[in-house]
Amino acid sequence: MMNELLSNPHAVKGLQSIALAAVILVLARIAISMATRKGRKATETSFAVKYAALFLFAVSLVYIWVDGFGPILTGLSIVAAALTIVAKELILNFIGSFVIFWREIFAIGDRVEIGEYSGDVIDKGILYFTLLETGQNALSGHSTGRLVKVPNGLALTMPIVNATRGAGYVWDEIGIVLTRSSDWEKGRARLLSLVDAHYEREGIDLERIKHTFEKRGIFFNRLTPRAYVDVATGGIRLTLRYLCRARLNRESRDYILTRFLDGLPGSGIELADEQP
């Protein structure tokens, strides 16, 4: 029985394929374990090892079943033509996964926006990456709790906004319209003082943030908050522009606006009926 099995070339190749899969699986798990012990992110390591193992297994299977690499070019040309027609989207997703990984477009944990999808990246795969979806406010929104599987091919054809790859901070703006009789200078000074209080509360160091931006090739003339004055319908518009932590836009607005509103009575500052 065993002799008959070993005398069958297809059976031998099948056994070799199974043994190869087992060996590569063991080596992949050892590689992930060693990388994790060195303090790297297990999620990113798993993604890299998955590619390396898949590539090694595919090449080895070709060598086992095609008896060398002689006939490969002819076979590949036929297979490539068929796949291009039948499975173009799958090919784009597969190529997109290489681009995402090797160009480091985003990593696990980054908050990104691509097309109509936005959220935190929680997984990267060969055909799709997974987002923990945010709400209507896109990059500043809170999680909805829903998972979105996004095709990797979109990374080849659409812009990707990454809110956490700069210095982990983004510019945010708060617009307020005051009545024309209000003391707008006092209102502007109040907004700027509240931003300073927010920075002190959160331990935000603008000089350190500027240095981090510059290390990534991003240069700003100034990072200090500004409050711009403009004339609006029904009053005077104040627009506060300031840096805040990515993902915490809403929290920073809440801190500033609640304290601004608390200080309105008796301050000579009054909100207009129409607000932006």
Image (tube, grey):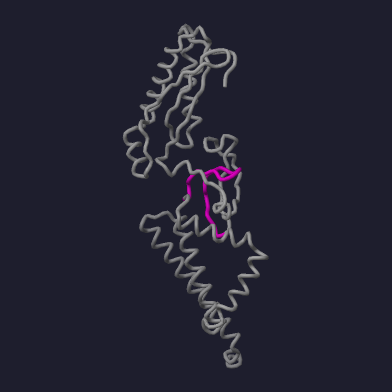
Disc count in the image?
0
Q: Position of residue 155 (x, y in %)?
A: 54, 52
**Quadrant in which residue 191 is drawn:** top left
Q: Position of residue 274 (x, y in %)?
A: 59, 16
Q: Position of residue 144 (x, y in %)?
A: 59, 39
Q: Residue at x 51, y 30 (%)?
A: 250
Q: Is residue 213 magenta?
A: no
* Residue 38 shown left or right of residue 132 in the figure: left
Quadrant where the C terminus is found in the figure: top right
Judging depth in this view, the residue of 128 and 200 nearest the camera is 128
* Residue 25 shown left or right of residue 86 in the figure: left
Q: Is residue 124 magenta?
A: yes
Q: Which portion, as a residue range, is magenta?
A: 107-126
Judging depth in this view, the residue of 249 and 31 nearest the camera is 249
Q: Is residue 197 above or below residue 79?
A: above
Q: Residue at x 63, y 65 (%)?
A: 84
Q: Is residue 109 above or below residue 248?
A: below
Quadrant where the N terminus is found in the figure: bottom right
Q: Position of residue 52 (x, y in %)?
A: 47, 66
Q: Is residue 155 above or below residue 248?
A: below
Q: Is residue 243 above or below residue 186?
A: below
Q: Residue furthest right?
A: 86
- Is most of the magenta stretch helix, strand or loop? strand
